[in-house]
Image (cartoon, grey):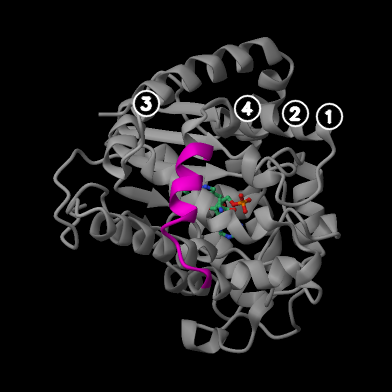
Amino acid sequence: MSNPSSSYNGPERVFSGIQPTGALHLGNYLGALTKFVALQHTHECIFCVVDLHAITMAQDPDKLRANTREAAATFIAAGLDPKKAIIFVQSAVPAHTELTWIFNCTARMGWLERMTQFKDKAGKDKERASVGLFDYPVLQAADILAYKATHVPVGEDQKQHLELSRDIAERFNRQYDAPGFFPLPEPLIKGPGARVMSLKDGTKKMSKSDPSDLSRINLDDDADTIARKIKKARTDPEPLPSDTGGLAGRDGAANLVGIYAALAQTSDQAVLDEFGGQGFGVFKPALAELAVSTLAPVSEKLRTLKADPAQIDRILHDGAARAQAIADPIIKEVRKTVGFWGAD
Ligand code: AMP
Ligand code: TRP
């Protein structure tokens, strides 16, 4: 994982975040969590529950607190080891908000106005969206760069935000005549599962905010619920094709094949080699069995962890202290670079 586009020569470091806005789902698992788990063995990793991002949309305070612990528990249930990777909550480390302000003065209005996620989330009436929602990608850049992270595992939907983070890093380095001060962080997106779609509409991404619970598989769903949701997934009456070209225009079918491939850690074509010519009456039960056998240990561990919130809190306190120890000297350097009083 080299980083040729920057003169940055610091160590490689991985950072990513997930919002505590409800139970994590199969899209989070395949697009993000499985990558986090693999990277903890090869890299210094920092994984964050981004509650500051969550409040860009209205949140109930008690639910936010519960969702924050639940997201952290899901990280661990999915296989993150808090002794290896740093797991913490964004609002516990002030570096994120401080660097956001500084980056607000580096990022340009025009850059943020192009962000498609803001347009989607703000909807028709963008005058009523919070300023925080508009600023969301700047906070994300601050998350990453407060640790000088070089690599960011995310799903496909975060590609544009990562490009903005690189633009901010590059502009800051130029603006303050500090070449190589910040790395230009590389997104790690590739692989099956980078874009898991809704089970009810294969043209929309699987999302926590979809009002239909049948649209997603939650990581705390039990085996029966998982099987039922897969059975009810929207597909078409045709049998599966024998090659991937035959999935064109068949969004529901393509999504289920993609989910199977990601869970089995193989390719779409390998799935079609096995199931081409078969109908969904055969394929859906096979997918349900694979999904249940992969996710059952995760939901079981999640249940155990949720029964012991004090343990989660200990992990999060420890994680925040370790994260802060990395961010503090970086923020000190930033203050000096920007010219703030008392930092020289
Ligand atoms: P969020 O739930 O929006 O905070 O997303 C957390 C992580 O999960 C990010 O890396 C997203 O790109 C990823 N993610 C969310 N939804 C999906 C999806 N449907 N397919 C793949 N990755 C996803
Ligand atoms: N915006 C990301 C999402 O919703 C979450 C996020 C916040 C993030 N800060 C980050 C991801 C930093 C990667 C790096 O999916």
Q: Do the residues labelled 2 and 1 touch (CB within 8 Å)?
A: yes
Picture coordinates of residue 271, whole percent (x, y): 49, 68
State the residue at coordinates (35%, 60%): 166
- CA gap, disc 4 to disc 1? 17 Å
State the residue at coordinates (18%, 51%): 180
Residue at the disc numbered 3: 328
Closer to us: mark 4 or mark 1?
A: 1
Q: Are marks 4 and 2 in contact (CB under 8 Å)?
A: no
Which region is colored magenta? 97-109
Residue at the disc numbered 2: 65
What element does badge 2 sit on? helix
At label 3, the amino acid type is Asp
At label 4, the amino acid type is Ala
Whichever of labels 2 and 3 marks the residue nearer the N terminus, that label is 2
What element does badge 1 sit on? helix
Q: Residue 73 carries which label?
A: 4
